[in-house]
């Protein structure tokens, strides 16, 4: 496939980007991430799978790390569940969405790659934190803060520690070889709420 930018693309450089191309590129990147892993996949492979030129990708994302973390950000939960839901239901829903996203893109392997490559490609881990890790933590903290304001959570509760405690079992279970059991999110939420919740 030619890597040169076509005349049409050159003329359209100042126009709004094509949403269809964006979607095709991000989807191709996710599929290759899951099947090839971060290290083995290339922008040329993404371009071929999305049926665009490599230059088209570079017009949108500067590096492979930029593209991959943008693709991951596109599939994560963007907003917290509606505030009318029960706190426990909200937290379980956020955790289950998190687990589904990680499993869909072979995310544990990507996390390992990010940590292993931190010395050589620090922007990969930085972008992963900025676009996926911190927004997910913010969703959980938002739900806990709302419950704290209404008296469901103790006023002195350390909410950052609670967020880590909610997410931690997913990683710990994976390392222990017991990942994927369906009740993990409910168990994590129940343990945390038992520790920081107020007694009605």
Image (tube, rainbow, N blue to C red):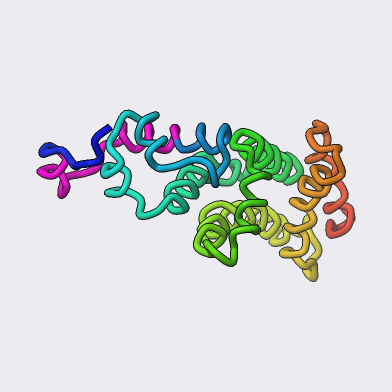
Q: Nearer the viewer, residue 199 or 156?
A: 156
Where residue 145 appears, x then y in whole percent? 67, 60
- Image quarter where the N terminus lies is top left
Residue 176, relative to residue 146: is it above or below?
above
**50, 130: nearer the viewer:** 50
For residue 45, above or below residue 142: above
Asked where in the image residue 102 lies, by quadrant, the reply is top right
Q: Is residue 196 above or below residue 12?
A: below
Segment colored magenta: 9-28
* Place of residue 79 in the rendered image (x, y in percent of width and height, measured from the top left): 54, 46
Taking the magenta stretch, the answer to whether it contains residue 22 is yes
In the depicted view, which residue is nearer to us: 129 or 182? 129
Which residue appears at 77% of the width and 64% of the height? Answer: 161
At 24% from the left and 35% from the top, the residue drawn is 2
Q: Nearer the viewer, residue 133 or 96?
A: 133
**Residue at coordinates 71% horizontally, 45% vertically from top-left?**
91
Q: Tell me the chief SS of the magenta region.
A: helix
For residue 135, side relative to residue 146 (left or right): left
List x then y, in percent, for residue 96: 70, 37
- The image shows residue 62 at horizontal and vertical percentages of 35, 54
Q: In the image as oriented, which residue stretches furthest toward the bottom?
A: 156
Residue occupying image coordinates x 52% and y 57%: 124
Q: Is residue 2 magenta?
A: no
């Amino acid at each position: 496939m030619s890597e040169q930018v076509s005349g049409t693309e050159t003329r359209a450089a100042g126009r709004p980007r094509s949403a269809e191309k964006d979607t095709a590129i991000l989807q191709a990147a996710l599929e290759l991430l899951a099947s090839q892993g971060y290290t083995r996949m290339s922008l040329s492979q993404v371009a071929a799978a999305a049926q665009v030129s490599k230059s088209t990708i570079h017009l949108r994302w500067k590096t492979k790390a930029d593209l991959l973390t943008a693709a991951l950000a596109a599939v994560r939960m963007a907003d917290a569940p509606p505030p009318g839901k029960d706190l426990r239901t909200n937290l379980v829903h956020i955790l289950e969405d998190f687990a589904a996203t990680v499993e869909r893109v072979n995310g544990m392997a990507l996390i390992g790659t990010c940590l292993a490559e931190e010395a050589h490609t620090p922007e990969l881990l930085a972008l992963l934190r900025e676009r996926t890790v911190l927004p997910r933590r913010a969703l959980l903290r938002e739900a806990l803060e709302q419950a704290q304001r209404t008296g469901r959570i103790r006023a002195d509760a350390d909410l950052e520690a609670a967020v880590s405690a909610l997410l931690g079992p997913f990683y710990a279970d994976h390392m222990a070889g017991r990942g994927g059991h369906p009740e993990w999110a409910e168990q994590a939420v129940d343990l945390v709420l038992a520790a920081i919740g107020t007694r009605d």
